[in-house]
Image (spheres, helix red, strand yellow):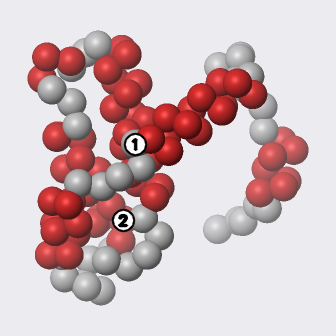
Amino acid sequence: MNWVSIRRLRRRASCSGTGVCPKQSELDDLSQKLGQERKIDPAMITLLRQFPKRRRPPWDVLRTAVSRAGLFTMPTSERGDHAANVRKSIRLTSQIAMNRRPL
């Protein structure tokens, strides 16, 4: 695997995928929303602690946790609503990125 430094990647990064780069105020707003959603349901912690340690690849555990979180984060009535999907994406992203300590 070829590793690329974050500085090199940043120099090459562009907004060509969407054609629109976010403004600083939009990035600040997203950071605030991510911070507000940075909590994990105690039932998720219980689930993660039930997995056998060192027997499953971490990616399998993460995939299962994200699937479980996705099932319980949005009422059925909101499915298909774009604004609800954005809120759910922010919630899931925040929860995935937050836990850096072992359970």
Give x and y (percent) for residue 17.
Answer: 66, 24
- Snapshot quadrant of residue 51: bottom left
Report x, y in % for residue 74.
21, 30
Q: Looking at the image, which residue is at 30% across and 55% down?
A: 40
- In the rendered image of this protein, does residue 71 appear above or below residue 39? above
Q: Observer-nearest residue: 11 or 81?
A: 81
Query: Which residue type carries mark 2?
Result: Trp
- The residue shown at (14%, 75%) is 50
Q: Amino acid at mark 1?
A: Glu
Residue behind mark 1:
37
Q: Judging from the image, what secondary structure is the residue with disc 2 in?
A: helix
Picture coordinates of residue 24, whole percent (x, y): 75, 28
User: Does residue 45 appear left or right of residue 89 in this picture?
Assistant: left
* Circle 1: element type: loop
- How would you rate the neighbour count of disc 2 (Cα within 10 Å): few for under 14, some for 14-19, many for 20 or more? few
At a point 84% along the width and 42% down the height, the residue shown is 12
Mark 1–mark 2 distance (CA, rounded to whole Å): 22 Å
Q: Which residue is mark 2?
A: 59
On-image quarter of the N terminus: bottom right
